[in-house]
Structure formats: structure tokens, C-alpha cells
Amino acid sequence: MVATGYRNTHPTTTTQHHLTGIPSHLPGARTLSVRLLSTGRQTLLCTVIETGTRMHFIVDTEVQVPMRDDISLAAKVWRPASGEPAPTLLLRSPYGTDDLHALGAAVIPDIFAFVNAGYAVMLQDIRGAQHSEGVFIPHVDDRGDGADTVAWLLEQDWCDGNVGMFGPSYMGFVQWQTASTGVPGLKAIAPATASDDFYHGPWYSPGGAFSSQCALSWTTVTSLMRGQFELANGRSVDPTDLATLAGLLADLPDLMRLLPTGSHPLLEKYAPWLATDVLAHPDRDEHWQRLAPIEHAESITAPALNIGGWYDIFINETFHAYNTMRRHGGSDEARNGQRLVIGPWAHGRGDSGVYPDRHFGMASSMDAAQLTNSHLSFFDRWLRGNKEALDDVAPVRIFVMGIDQWRDEQEWPLPDTQYTDYHLTGSGPANTATGGGLLTTTAPEAGSQDTYLYDPQRPVPTLGGTVLGLRPEDPIGPVDQRPNETREDVLCYTTPVLTQPVEVTGHVSLTLLVSSSAVDTDFTGKLVDVHPDGRAIILCEGMQRTRYRNSLADPELMQPGKIYEITLDLAATSNVFLAGHQIRLEVSSSNFPRYNVNTNTGGIITQETEADMITAVNRLHHGPVHPSRLTLPVINRPDTTR
């Protein structure tokens, strides 16, 4: 690949420079060495020859976009060299835009493909990130800044008045926020592995527990990046701070065990918002409701291409956004134009579909799923008005694990879903996988209970599942759960060995009849596929903090010893349990550090220490009077389960 030629609007002396912003992770791409002018606005005219195809484009490397409060946000613009107005695609990032490889690798579409297809692309540093002015506080300014940026794009002579947005994770959060303003000109968004509700997603959970692993990992990473940005911009930063933050990343488990939660002095220094904007709001109060874009669904008129993973930390929110917009979107286009793609992917390092304990095949990767083509077809439909662009694209495309195949669907949830209760029962205590816990579709005739001691100082360790994969040593996704299944505080309920395959595709829920010696405690649930070789591979999971059993906004403590019915949202999956496998449910009261441990006191958990913790005797009741049950979305299609 070669680049030739340059153009600058402010002629002056030239220097040799490396063009930043080239997506070097793309196949066949490499960083270009080109001549840049050392002063004024830098505008390059590039010719790129890749795999025999010649592309011409212009890159504006120093663009300043003014916000309503006079803060300027830095951006780079890639646009066709023809100079003709073009539909424009916007990515807004908190991670900087100099190195696209750091933005998300395979889940970010090929920028070259966009430009070669005639789109302009703008990559923008959000407020307080890298080259942009202002102070970074997650979510607070992204709604208005996104709307101001779209309005600015509409004023540029190279933009034809049609704007789309794309990008994963936080770059997906800001899309929902921008769309919720109803800003004119925003015609489509493509949030990948993202959340439409920031309480449910990065910071807490649908069951009300603090998402320790995700929240503290991400806060540490962004704190380190903030320091690096400040240092690069010539501001005073203590180099030992950066070294210490890097050390925290190297030993995240110690940081997550630190109590009170988030009390490390460097997090207080570089991320004061963790205490004031996150930990100070353990309930889903007005603070979170105000920030949640999906609370303004009726104002969102742009259709969305929703991309997620079965093991992504935001899988619940991906489905929630799709279904909410289908019902309550602010336009026919928003309601009927939703698209959904779900693969066997995790957040951070799970784009290949290959994990140590489970390999989903060559077709399972994000690259094999051709997400760039999905983006192009979607944007061609909504930014260019090509009504045929999506003619051969199903509204829903999911990867079915077990048989490890992609499948097109017309709706979600699937219309032929048969919600089937698997009752919790047993021939003896269900403690450990070798106990007597059973799952059966036949309602039990006799009642019983299973009991365990939950000690918050000895939590059940997180083994994969829906976690944020920042470090290579952190297990993510489909991890074997057998090490946890030997613990006395893990109840296991298992079906007999299956003689016929059972497909489970959809949302999974767990209804438990429980009591506790404490006024507040947690209950966790995991759906597991037990393979003939003994591997117990997690499929999906969830938890419920009992104080939030009726409402995330209005906590209610329990009366010790009283039996309560609670429902755990175990998110969603698509898996065929093959013949010879078993379906297993794990129940316990901790999953740390995926969620913070409950101290069992009924107090403000993130402000407590080990000295405050008390143990809880937790009981799970089952039988005809107390029908604890796992509800699975069963799909009976013989042609897909053979």
C-alpha cells in the first residue's frame, strides 16, 4: 500500500511525519509515511493502492468542532478526494483517535471501506479525551456534545446532510445519547457491544449489584489514559502516578478487593466522578434515569444496527435497546428499521470466537461475520436511501452455539419460543455438582429446601462469563465452571443426560423461593452446558440483590427467616444442548469480582469494609408450595438440532 501527494490550505515549510489515524490493524494496511506541513490546518491528499484497488481520499488531521459552551473537540476527517458532498459517518471516542487499533480492533468497521464506498468519516475525541478540551466525566456531556457535533457536520460543504454513527462500547453509548436528542440529520446509528442504560450496563446490573470487575477495570484504564493525555499535551503530571496506575492494571484483583470500594487515592485523584457520579448512586435513582438514553426512546428517530455477543457484558442492554425501539421508537424508520447481529463474542478479547475451554469454529469470528459489509448495507439504506440495500439481509442474525452455526431470523424473541419450566428438586442436598440437585420438567410432588452458608469474605470467584476482558490472563466467556462446583456454597441442579438435543434460544429467567438469616443478601444463577467430557461451560448468568427484588429505585430489606419469591434475569443465550450433554443450573450468593460482594448488613455496601461483613445462612425452597424454577426459551425445530 502506498500514498502519494499532499495538499495543505496553509503553504509553508514541510517536515517528514507519520500520518496518524491509519487503521493499521486492517488486513494489508500499514502506517503511511507522508509529508505533512508543520503549521496550520493539516490537509492531506492521499492515494492508497491496496490489493489492486486505487482509492483517493482527503484527510483533515486537525479539525476543531465548537460546542455550545465554547469548548472545542478535536477530530480527524476522512473524505473522498472528489470534493463532492458525501454522507458522513461519525465515531466519538474517549480513548483517543490517533491509534484506531486501540479503539476496538475487529468490532470497528474498515474505515477504508467506508471512504472507498463514498462516505466521509469523522473520528472525534470526546470532551476531555486526548486532543479535545474540557473535563471528562462519563456520560454527563455526551448527549449535548453529540448533538452539537452532528449539527456542525450538517454545516460543512463536504457533508450532504445525512449523518450516521458507529463504534463499540462507550462509542456505542454516545450514539444512543446523541440519537435521544432527536437532532436533525442523524439518519442511522450502529452501536456495537453497547448499553442503552448506564445503570444496567457498565456500572451496576439488572439485579442491583455494583459491577466491580467492569467498573473498576475501566476506571483504572481511563485514569491511566487521562494521565497520558495530560502528559502528552504538556501539562504537569506526576510520572509515578502513571507507573502506579499501570501497576494497578497489572494486579486488578487487589484493587477490586480494596474496601471501601474505589478508595484508592489515584482513582480519587484521576477519576473523582467514580465516587460522586457512580458510587454515590447505588439505586437506579433520578441520576441514572436522567442519563439513560432509552428513557427517551420516543425521541429517537434513527434506526439502529445493534451488534452484540452472547458473552458481552452488555448483552442484556443490546436486546433491551432492540426490543424497546421496536415498540417505542420515535418514527416508523426507528421502529421497523432495527437490525440485530449476535455472535459468540465477549467484550475486549472475545472477537475470534475461540476460547481456551470452547472453540466455536472458523465462522464464529467477527471478521468472518463481515461486520463491515453489514454496516455498509445498513448505512446505504438509511443514509443514501437505497431501499434495496437490505433486501437480502434478515432483521435478526444470531450464532447458535452447540451446533455452531449462523442463523437468520425475522423477529426477536423468536415467535415459536416455548417457555418451559425446569423445576428445582433433588434426591438430596444440592450442594456441589456431586450432590442430589435435579432439574426436571415434571413438577415435584414433595417440598424441600437446600441450605448453604454465604460468607462475603470467601466469595465464589468469577470464572469467565460476561466480564470485561482487558488482560490476557483474565478468563472471559465460555469458561469451565467445575472448580466452583466443588464448593459447599454452590448449589447445582442438573438434568439427566439428554437423549435428544434441546435448543434454548432467548431470554432465560430464574424464579427462586428464598429465605435468609440476613436482612439483605444476594442470589446468583448460572446456566451451564455440561459436556460428555465433564466440562461445565457457562452460557449466561445473572444475580439479584434482595433489597432490589421489587424495584431498583426503592430498596426494601427482608425480614430474616421469611420466604420471598425473587426473579433473576439470566440474560439471553442461543445454545443447542446436544444429546449426551446435560443442562445445569448453579445457584449461589456471590460471583466476585463480576459483582461486588454483599456484606449482608443492609447498609451502603460500597462504603463498608471487611469489619462490617456478616455471614448469612441462605435457603432455597422448592416443591409444590414453593415452586422454584428455571424458565428456558425452548425452540423445537428438528432441522436445526440434529
Image (tube, rainbow, N blue to C red):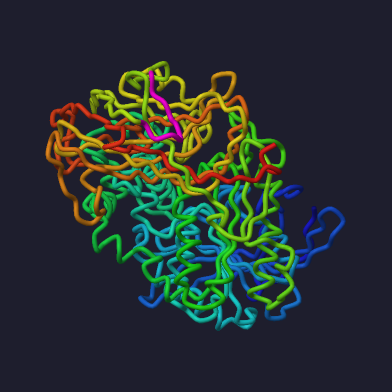
Q: Give the percent coordinates (x, y) of residue 201.
A: 39, 51
Describe residue 101's horizontal placement relative to residue 513 as left or right: right
Q: Nearer the viewer, residue 44 or 292?
A: 292
Q: Is residue 377 above or below residue 570?
A: below
**Could you tell me which residue is drawn at 44 percent across and 71 percent down?**
328
In reply to whether residue 443 is colored magenta, the answer given is yes
Describe residue 478's horizontal placement relative to residue 254 as left or right: right
Res. 225 visible in picture: yes
Which corner quadrant holds the C terminus? top right
Describe residue 611's horizontal placement relative to residue 177 as left or right: left
What residue span does the magenta drawing correspond to? 436-444
**Could you tell me which residue is drawn at 15 percent across and 44 percent down?**
557
Res. 72 visible in picture: no
Q: Give the percent coordinates (x, y) of residue 181.
A: 42, 75
Q: Give the percent coordinates (x, y) of residue 402.
A: 62, 35
Q: Is residue 584 above or below residue 406?
A: above
In reply to whether residue 401 is colored magenta, the answer given is no
In the displayed image of the protein, which residue is found farthest to the right? Answer: 52
**Could you tell me which residue is drawn at 82 percent across and 58 percent down?**
49
Q: Nearer the viewer, residue 599 or 441?
A: 441
The total number of labels drawn is: 0
